Image (cartoon, rainbow, N blue to C red):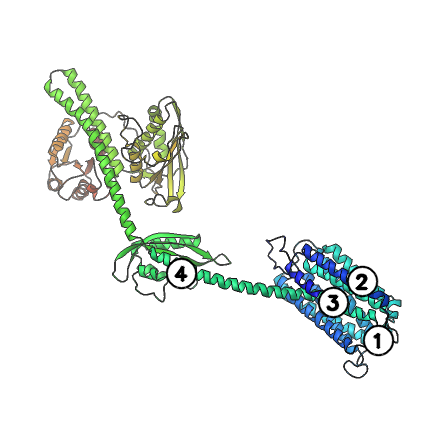
Amino acid sequence: MGIEILTSLSVADRRPSRNPGRTEPTTLATAEASAGQRWAAALFCAVVLAATLAVVPSASRPMPAFPGFLALNQGALLVVYGVTSWLLFSQVARARCAAMLALAGGMLFTALVVLAQLVAFPDMLGPGLVVGHGPATLTWLWTFWHVGIPAVALPYAIIESRPGPRQMPASRVRAATWGTVVLAVAAALVTAAVCARYAARLPAVADPDGGYRALTRSGVGPLSVALNAVALVVLVAATRLRRVLQLWLAVSLFILMLDNVITDIGAARATMGWFTGRVEALISGLVVLGIYLAEVADLYRQASAAASASEGARREAEAARDSLEIALDASGMGDWQLDLRTDQSRRSLRHDRIFGYGEPQRRWSSARMLDHVVPEDRPIVERAIAGALAGSELRFECRIRRVDDGRVRWIAVQGRTYRDEEGRPATLAGCVADVTERRLTDDRLREAQRMEAIGQLTGGVAHDFNNLLTVILGSLDMISRKPGDAARVERLARNAFAAGRRGTELTEKLLSFSRRQVVNPEVVNLNRILSELEPLLHRAVGEDVEVSLDLDPRLDPVRLDPGQFQAAVLNLAGNARDAMPDGGTLSVSTRNATFGEDDLRDVPEAAPGPHLVVTVADTGTGMDAETAARVFEPFFTTKEIGKGTGLGLSQVYGSARQAGGFCRLRTAPGEGCAVDICLPRSTEAGAEAAPAAAGVPLRRAAGGEVVLVVEDEDALREMAAESLGALGYRVLTACDARAALDVLRGDARIDILFSDVVMPGGMNGAQLAAAAGAIRPGLKVLLTSGYTTTATGGTRELPRGVPLLRKPYLREDLAAKLHTVLGS
């Protein structure tokens, strides 16, 4: 009676859950009933109701004998309810639904009671009655299996109507299932035993001829119909039949109720009403079984489609992988995948060839890869892998030694970490490429850029120094022509002196930019230096610009050359003043900061760790991106010709790099400019501020102190000796370090060694100072230099505690340094 329509609609019109985020599996217990299913259910009920009403006028009419009908009907009912209970129990294990568990138990109880009724029929298992009391036992068993389904439909509806999740914990499903099975079996056994042994003591529900008139007169029949109706009403009211199982369970209860009614009207066996009731009972059981069989068929269809799709996806994945390997091989890249649990990897042939293998290697681990990495680069690789395991991205470049020819090659590795369900790293996968040629190309490009910068630098230096030399030589020429005009000589001498000073400043900026200037670093507190520099900043920017200092009192110490740092800040202040022609604010702030490797990707030469950040910001016109990208280039300037050398920010950058730090620029048109000078924190304690030495008069030799002057340039040696003599010192001279050592090994009194840093002969001034200290412990040393890294053996710092007098210097500078040296 329309079972095909019922089963097809139960699956085809099933809609997904309204809550796609639910984790419970989609089954008939959780799938939403569609409008099409509701119309199908209503139509099905209407058809069965119409057929039942059509039978009512002739319900008591006897039907011809149908041999074997009873056995076939009872056997079919037993199979239907038994299979349905098994399907429901299996769905409970999948959906963990407590309401479905109650329904499965009711179906099992009904199947067992139907079995007991089948056994109780006369002549079914043997001649006569095997068990029970004939019609009374059969009618009571018929009544109990008719009320079994409505009885469990009530708790099913109540459980389904509760708000919140209805799933049982997975750990309790197995125990609950077996408990329900035991309870259903026990209830069926008790029911069968009572009906078989005590039917005579129960209310009379069967006529002596086997009719059902007594069932109606006793009220048991109407009570069974009422229970069915109550269960149907409660189910509809509590659940609104929202889900597929709820909808078709209501249909089953409705048809079972019609079975009760038409059987009571038929009033006897073998009547048309009785036959109709038996068919409706079977249809009632088939309703739920039918939708579950349809779901099994649908699941099988979905599994077949998924298997086909999976096979297609596998073939597509293999094709995509083949295409990827071809593309990677064409680009010189190899792919790899490392299982972190077994430390074994899957690799392409190109991967192994990059490491110098002609054939694929059977085994490859992270340790074997590290064996190829040159020892100097292994910490880089280990840090990168550790970072990828902690995060996700893997990216590094290192040098490896190939196994076939022993050549060192650069490789670039890029990949990511994949994690398991518990979030633990499970796999590293990525690609590797030989980037040696690219590195060589980059080096050649950098060299070309360096040569271009040197060309630009040379032109700029030549231009500026030619201007300065013109002033100096012109002034000296005019002095030599008319030496008798004292006022004129004094004016020309001042011009030459000023040009020389400008040349000194230009030289210092050049050396700072090239990071070849000899520095005399100290561990200092930048807050103190900036506080002392504040009055000079006010004078540097003028009255229209407000100067604001925001200094972190917890600022860490830093090791640098204080003079260079002061010059860098003043350079920035001068640029800020020019960017604020109508006035504004110059802000100088300090703070502590910690930079990780990710923060320094754009500054590969900087080391991660604790830093100090000095920010010099203005509220001026700002710069566009193109200008900002070139501000640290030598001789690049946005000022008018003659207004600047273009070395200011280059000097700032160079001094920061000499201190081990770096610079960053933040700017935009109309939003001002901020320069961050980032310097590494020093672990040494800061030195106390020295008392100011301003205004110290020229110190003359009071006790006939002897100075050994070591200078390879004759003119400079003569000038130094003359200046020292004018200050009252006795002077010994040497043209190089070896000659100076010979003098030091003699008996002459020597109080101070005054030596140039850069000298020929294989020994520079710093090395001479160390050798002199070994010959004459406690000897005072003063070094002088205008250059250079190579002069101090590749370092830019002098030995700790050795003072330095920068070239060019005046007699006043020399006197002040001597005062410091002799007083130390």
Mark 2 neighbour density, 10 Å: few (under 14) some (14–19) many (20 or more): some
Could you say where residue 406 lies in the image, as x and y percent from the top left? 25, 60
Name the residue carrying label 1. Answer: 135
- Position of the C terminus, as image quadrant, is top left
What's the mark number on residue 385? none
Q: Are marks 4 and 3 in contact (CB under 8 Å)?
A: no
Rounded to the nearest angstrom, the CA distance separating label 1 from label 3 is: 24 Å
Q: Give the image location of residue 545, x and y in percent.
A: 38, 24
Name the residue that disc number 3 marks: 283
Q: What residue occupies the far bottom of the structure in this picture?
A: 127
**Who is closer to the viewer here, 86 or 164?**
86
Q: Secondary structure at mark 2?
A: helix
- What type is the residue that disc 1 sits on? Pro
Query: Which residue matches tag 4?
Result: 322
Residue 580 vs residue 781: left or right? Answer: right
Q: Are marks 1 and 3 in contact (CB under 8 Å)?
A: no
User: In the rendered view of the protein, which quadrant contains the N terminus?
Assistant: bottom right
The residue that label 2 is drawn on is: 227
Q: CA distance from mark 4 to mark 2?
A: 68 Å
Separation of marks 4 and 3 at Cα, in angstroms: 57 Å
Q: Earlier in the sequence, mark 2 or mark 1?
A: 1
Looking at the picture, which amino acid does disc 4 mark?
Asp
Instruction: Indicate left or right for 138 with 525 as reference.
Output: right
Real-space Cα distance between discs 2 and 1? Answer: 23 Å
Q: Earlier in the sequence, mark 4 or mark 1?
A: 1
Kind of residue sitting beneath label 2: Leu
**Amino acid residing under circle 3:** Ile
Please tell me which residue is depicted at 81% across the width and 82% down the height of the picture: 128
| Element on which disc 1 rests | helix
Question: In this orientation, does residue 422 appear?
Answer: yes
Q: Nearer the viewer, mark 4 or mark 1?
A: 4
Q: Residue at 32%, 36% (x, y): give it.
A: 630
